[in-house]
Image (cartoon, rainbow, N blue to C red):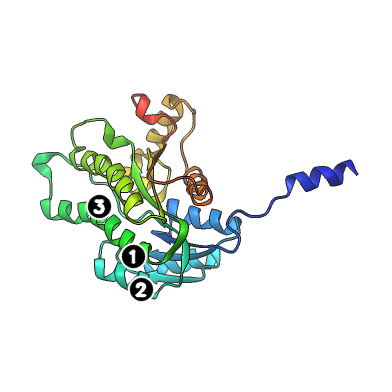
Amino acid sequence: MSNAVTASHIQREPELLGQTVVVIGGSAGIGLETARRARTEGAKVILAARNPERLKRAASEVDALSTAAFDASDPVAIERFFRDLPMIDHVMVTAGRPYYGRLADMDFAKIRDLIGEHLLQALYVARGAASKVRPGGALIFMGGTGGRRPAIGMSIAGAVTAALPILTANLALEIAPVRVNLIAAGFVDTPLSAELLGDQLEKRRNQLRTTLPIRRVVGPADVAALAVHIMTNTALTGATYDIDGGQQFVAA
């Protein structure tokens, strides 16, 4: 009898049961891990990403309801994607990558594209989500904490880091009752991090294990857990949620 009572207390209904989660940038890293977590919580998932082959593998793994391969910085593609969607409950956007570089070495054509990926993309997605996300559902963007500390080579990353929380708060008012929130991550151990750091990856991991207050490296599962919490807690909107293991507080 005691065992039966204990089991009944442990069991719970999945928090996203019957809901549909769209992940833009969902073929790898944080996006794919968020799709996995959403599936575990009972959601159906729709994945969008740039690389068709990687998208196909990810979709097979999470039994995606559907997929769409497109460049998330293309406003026409985003508009078409949302137009063809059924009504959904949540959107997570992880597409895009940071830009680091000194002023003297900047490729200004590339910078224009990257700023568009982070800021204009957010506007494109918000406009599409406004008519497709059910009231109380969440639109979640990804940002960072690293750009808050001025440093050589961080001009563009810092500008985008500063802009996204303000954009998020304003969009939360403008497209309500859809909720809009921002996840600001530090270093996350993803394939993108591996690509950016190359043979310096393990050195960076060891440095963070030593210096971060949490004494470990933040992984995609940590961010995915936060994303799903934001989806399920309907009191959260217009806010920025840091998840960097304390990286912004130490010389890491």
Identify the mark at residue 83; answer none if there is no mark. Answer: 2
* Residue 13 placement: quadrant: bottom right
- The residue carrying mark 1 is 128
Give the Cα distance between marks 1 and 3: 15 Å
**N-terminal-most mark, 2 or 3:** 2
Mark 2 packing: few (<14 Cα in 10 Å), some, or many (20+)?
few
Identify the mark at residue 119; answer none if there is no mark. Answer: 3
Give x and y (percent) for residue 247: 38, 30
Give the Cα distance between marks 2 and 1: 7 Å
Q: How many marks?
A: 3
Specify the amino acid type for callout 1: Gly
> Toward the viewer: 141 or 218?
141
Mark 1 packing: few (<14 Cα in 10 Å), some, or many (20+)?
some
Specify the amino acid type for callout 3: Leu
Is there CB contact under 8 Å for labels 1 and 3? no
Going by the image, does 189 lie left or right of 173?
right
> Toward the viewer: 26 or 201?
26
Going by the image, does 221 lie left or right of 50?
right
**N-terminal-most mark, 1 or 3:** 3
> Residue at left 35%, top 42%?
199
> Toward the viewer: 223 or 110?
223
Q: Is residue 51 above or below residue 101?
A: below
Going by the image, does 7 lie left or right of 58?
right
Give x and y (percent) for residue 133: 43, 63
Going by the image, does 1 lie left or right of 224?
right
Q: Is residue 77 above or below residue 151?
A: below
Specify the amino acid type for callout 2: Arg
One can see residue 151 in this view:
yes
Give the Cα distance between marks 2 and 3: 21 Å
